[in-house]
Image (spheres, helix red, strand yellow):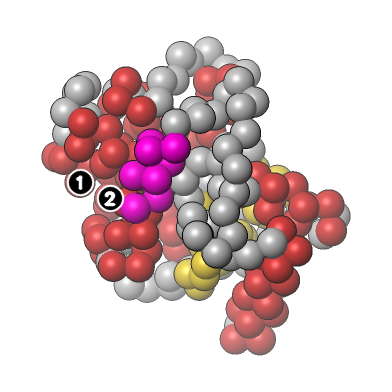
């Protein structure tokens, strides 16, 4: 089962990934591209209105390259972020008109991201919810700007709920779900989605 957890920052995505792997020891954990390429890698990757085509492009294509390593649903892996995430973050930066990222660049990312999603079985979106607010954690890595998180979350909702960019592939799309509520409830929702896909593919 190939699962990706997607959404704006500081909403509990990594917690879902870590908790899932702790409960399901046969799953591989694929790290967030920023942590591999920027935090522990050779690139300086900036956020907000300072992101560039290089910053977001390398994260997108690293994410796609990792997806392509897993060709069948028999492989057990969960990804912290999906290729779609870099479309949402790039659209935020394009809206600021502050770097070389513009609407045309964002649109140029869509085809590659869409084509890669047929390598996923479940695409799980973690939205911001007034019913279950998540406090921002100042870990020295993630931005602690509430408006930034909110605006990126709004773009994710346009993509996943309103069909902006028509991001899901027509053939073999992943099951798109939303994870809301407590950490325990999110894990239950994810487990139910896994069971659903397993039943449908038997």
The part of the image, by quadrant, that contains residue 72 is bottom right
- What residue is at 65 percent from the left and 45 percent from the top? 14
The percent coordinates of residue 91 (x first, y second) are 26, 41
Q: Is residue 78 left or right of residue 91?
A: right
The percent coordinates of residue 131 (x first, y second) are 55, 64
Q: Tell me the CA gap for discs 1 and 2.
A: 5 Å
Given residues 156 and 68, the one toward you in this image is: 156
- What residue is at 36 percent from the left and 59 percent from the top? 157
* Mark 1, residue position: 107
Magenta segment: 146-154
Q: Is residue 47 left or right of residue 100?
A: right
Q: Is residue 195 left or right of residue 169?
A: right
* Mark 2, residue position: 110
Kindly indicate whether the residue at mark 2 contacts the one at mark 1 (C-beta within 8 angstroms). yes
Given residues 138 and 60, the one toward you in this image is: 138
Q: Is residue 135 left or right of residue 185?
A: left
For the N terminus, the quadrant is bottom right
The percent coordinates of residue 149 (x first, y second) are 43, 41
Q: Is residue 14 above or below residue 42?
A: below
**Residue 149 shows up from this direction:** yes
- What residue is at 46 percent from the left and 46 percent from the top? 8
Circle 1 sits in a helix, a strand or a loop, which is it? helix
């Amino acid at each position: 089962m190939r699962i990706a957890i997607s959404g704006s920052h500081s909403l509990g995505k990594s917690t879902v990934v870590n908790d899932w792997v702790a409960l399901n020891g046969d799953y591989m954990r694929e790290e967030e591209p920023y942590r591999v390429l920027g935090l522990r890698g050779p690139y300086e990757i900036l956020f907000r209105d300072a992101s560039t085509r290089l910053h977001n492009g390398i994260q997108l294509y690293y994410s796609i390259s990792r997806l392509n390593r897993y060709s069948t649903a028999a492989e057990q892996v969960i990804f912290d972020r999906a290729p779609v995430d870099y479309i949402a973050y790039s659209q935020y930066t394009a809206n600021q008109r502050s770097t070389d990222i513009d609407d045309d660049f964002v649109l140029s990312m869509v085809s590659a991201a869409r084509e890669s999603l047929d390598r996923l079985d479940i695409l799980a979106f973690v939205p911001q919810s007034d019913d279950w607010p998540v406090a921002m954690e100042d870990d020295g890595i993630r931005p602690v700007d509430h408006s930034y998180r909110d605006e990126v979350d709004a773009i994710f909702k346009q993509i996943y709920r309103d069909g902006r960019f028509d991001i899901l592939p027509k053939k073999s799309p992943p099951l798109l779900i939303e994870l809301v509520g407590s950490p325990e409830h999110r894990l239950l929702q994810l487990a139910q989605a896994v069971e659903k896909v397993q039943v449908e593919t038997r």
